[in-house]
Image (spheres, rainbow, N blue to C red):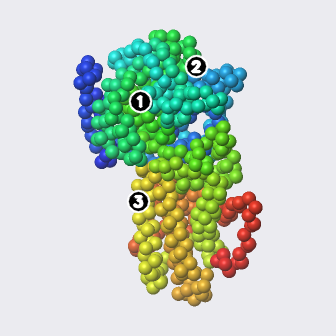
Amino acid sequence: MNRTLILQCVGRLQRGFFLAPVSAPWSTRRVRHACKDVGKEEKNYYITTPIFYVNASPHLGHLYSAVLADCMHRYKLLQGFHSRFATGTDEHGLKIQQAADAAGEDPLAFCTSVSQRFRRLFGSCHVSFTDYIRTTEERHRRAVEHFWCLLRDRGLIYKGIYEGWYSTPDESFLTPTQVADAVDSSGDAIKVSLESGHKVEWLKEENYMFRLSAFRTQLLDWLHNNPGAIQPERFRQEVLQWLQDDLPDLSVSRQRSRLQWGIPVPGDPDHTVYVWLDALVNYLTVAGYPGDHKRWWSVSRHVVGKDILKFHALYWPSFLLGAGLALPRGLYVHSHWTVGGKKMSKSLGNVVDPLERSRAFTVEGLRYFLLRQGAPDSDCDYTDDKVIKLLNAELADSLGGLLNRCTAPALNPAQIYPHFCPKSFSGMQDPEDDRMLDAVRSLPSVVEHHYDTLHTYKGLEAVASCVRQTNGFVQRHAPWKLDKTDGGGRRRLDTVIHVSLECLRIYGTLLQPAVPLLADQLLSRLGVRADERKWTDLDFLSSQKGTDCSFQGRALGPDTGVLFSRLERPGEEKPKKMNKKQTK
């Protein structure tokens, strides 16, 4: 094989791999590194969520994964990238077979019903995927069969006896150190997975095995030479810790007599492809594999929950290295949502229905809460009270209040983007104003850094902080107290409003990936056209620098009502209406 498979690198941290010829013994192969300048290439971006298992209806954690990836996709579009965003459903495996049997349904009909629930949820929550894949599709079957045959022909799949623990709920093979003793609800002694707590069973069957043990060195090399390969860093360190031990070969099939609902092993109808090998290939299927897939696969990135890190950080890169394919540019790992500090579960009755909550708090409100409060590094606890408190403070009062003040007819009777007067501004400027202006000028680069590393909550936190500072700016200069009949007072009032509207324009542009409809309402109210909302339009307060501001004198857009209505806690009295003077 020609040793030319090069993975392009991104930025300073990303590097790629190509394999030694297939004829070389696996024990002596090493991954070599190559780095290519991609600065002048077409700007492509491909991001995925995990495909979601259809054994049950979607919950809040599924929506969080989807909204995170959606935010990244929208952000890259704003930056001028050609972006592809894939999500979908994982529909094979013993757990699905058992769930369909229990429901008395045909497996495909069962899968279709649940998959549609995921699709409806994502559609209603403005998840703008470009491809929704189901593993029961014919295009995916073709990709899996081709991928299997490639690994087999390279000598990486062999027939052997698997004997060990297996968790059906997790569809995961486990080593003895990954299980523990427990007692079930009937008082019987059982073994459970240390990771998930699910019951495991002992299996002994003839299966096809993948030579996972051959890839430990390559995986270590990949992670040591690519600090950004898995983010946040704590999860990269966790994988490195796993790799301190030898990797056992992995069973990649189940006997057809045990598992009928899946893709048959090519050339051996008595075996079914292991559900995780099947599922992981979906990322390649969407990219066009086994056809022309390089344009998208070379820029692939995955958003995954921490519970499936092992499959994406050990199995998936090993499969790809074995097939001679590029590794993903990055794995973005997020933690879980809990309720009362406990994992959501049907038995505890604490599962949060995201569709119901989106109706209670609005779609934009729920999206904002998840992205603003969800920290990838640690689990986040959900309560309705937290949602109400955050949305009232940051969307209704702070951001909505600022927009209402600056566009109110009492302060802006002409309903225009007023002119900036440098002389008036220099005469009223104080150190607090300077700090605010510096914060807003640097905000795009701050948000860009946090969005790029999937620390979306930090980006939104930075925006919220600047919104508070801008409210302070308006409060300090109290434009409602200025004499509008005096030329100097009018110019000063216009300048305060101009600066505030410029701040709002920056905030609205930066918020588009997170809350697209709310940001659209804000920017439309300011009169900002659809072609003026890109990342390259984040030039703040150009009038102060002596350059022309295209917004000066432009009519504001129509007033479509409050930006975000305050939410009420159960039993809470409605706040008293403020008089006109207070709202100025």
The spot of residue 355 in percent (x, y) is 67, 45
Residue 323 visible (yes or no): no
- Disc 1 marks a residue whose amino acid type is Tyr
Q: Residues within 10 Å of mark 1 (few under 14, many from 20)?
A: some
Answer left or right for 32 relative to 374: left
**Alpha carbons under labels 1 and 3: distance apart:** 35 Å
Quarter of the picture holding the C terminus:
bottom right
- Disc 2 marks a residue whose amino acid type is Trp
Q: Earlier in the sequence, mark 1 or mark 2?
A: 2
**Alpha carbons under labels 2 and 3: distance apart:** 49 Å
Residue 213 visible (yes or no): yes
The spot of residue 493 in percent (x, y) is 55, 80
Q: Residues within 10 Å of mark 2 (few under 14, many from 20)?
A: many
Q: Residue at x 57, y 27 (%)?
A: 189
- Dot 2: element: loop
The spot of residue 462 in percent (x, y) is 48, 62
- Dot 3: element: helix
Disc marking residue 315: 1
Disc marking residue 225: none
Q: Residue at x 33, y 35 (%)?
A: 244
Residue identified by numbered label 2:
261
Q: Earlier in the sequence, mark 2 or mark 3?
A: 2
Viewer-closest of 273 and 482: 273
**Decide: marks 1, 3 in contact (CB < 8 A)?**
no
The spot of residue 308 in percent (x, y) is 48, 36
